[in-house]
Amino acid sequence: AQSVSQHNHHVILSEAASLELGCNYSYGGTVNLFWYVQYPGQHLQLLLKYFSGDPLVKGIKGFEAEFIKSKFSFNLRKPSVQWSDTAEYFCAVNKGYSTLTFGKGTMLLVSP
Amino acid sequence: DTGVSQDPRHKITKRGQNVTFRCDPISEHNRLYWYRQTLGQGPEFLTYFQNEAQLEKSRLLSDRFSAERPKGSFSTLEIQRTEQGDSAMYLCASSPDTGFNEQFFGPGTRLTVL
């Protein structure tokens, strides 16, 4: 069965620290990859997506992610986090127009 | 607001009662998805519509669950004879037919079964 694994359930960082959240998936073939974010009290929002082309994709708010096909990974990075990045982050995968398979999420707490 | 809307936002019910949730997708989106999210988990797929046709259902969707999308616009999700294990956030998402499958999520309906 297809699955998505997020390595850390909780991450605590100080402002200006660098962030990397791990995501691995188990799918064969061509996949679409997503990172969604859920800020406190808000609904899921798309942070960035990868369909094809350059494996380094840039999203909103300074986030980026790198698709490494050989490692089945799609890790999320940000060079310098802000207090406003405190949120839960979900990695998700699908093929074509199929439904999304999500990881369990990583709760990021950024202390000022 | 032209995003996905869901109603109600919160529902508290007693075990054994029936509940119905509504989702209004973004108007030009033909595809509509229902997901369920419990504490500490990511959203899990329940069912998916393209226009009015229900194309896929998860094994999570027991016989007590039914979803409809009459006329291919809004959708309803009904849970009959609710159980405490049904307590969760029920999320609706929509996506367009063209381009890639970027799904836009609504705020969810939080169900508590007492």
Image: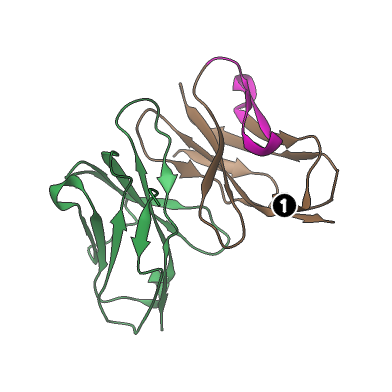
Q: Is residue B110 left or right of residue B83?
A: right
For disc 1, the neighbor class at 10 Å (few under 14, some 14 to 19, many from 20) is: few
Rendered-image quadrant of the C terminus of chain A? bottom right
Q: Is residue A75 left or right of residue A17?
A: left
Judged from this view, the residue extending furthest toward the front is: B1
Vertical side of B111 occupied by A71: above or below: above
On the image, the x and y values in percent for residue B50 come to 23, 39
The residue stretch that appears in magenta: A53-73
Relative depth, front residue between A40 and B42:
A40
Residue type marked 1: Ser
Q: Is residue A65 left or right of residue B36?
A: right
How is this picture coloured? by chain
Residue shown at the point (36%, 60%) measured from the top left: B6
Residue shown at the point (46%, 42%) measured from the top left: A101
Residue shown at the point (35%, 35%) measured from the top left: A98
Let me know if residue A54 is in the magenta part.
yes
On the image, the x and y values in percent for residue A88 come to 63, 53
Find numbered disc 1 in the image and state the secondary structure of the residue it sits on. helix
Q: Which chain is brown?
A: A
On the image, the x and y values in percent for residue A1 come to 44, 39
Vertical side of B100 occupied by A38: above or below: below
| Number of marks in picture | 1
Relative depth, front residue between A26 and A80:
A80
Residue identified by numbered label 1: A84
**Which chain is mark 1 on?**
A
Judged from this view, the residue extending furthest toward the left is: B71
Q: Which tint is chain B?
A: green
On the image, the x and y values in percent for residue A69 come to 59, 21
Question: Residue A76 lies in what quarter of the image?
Answer: top right
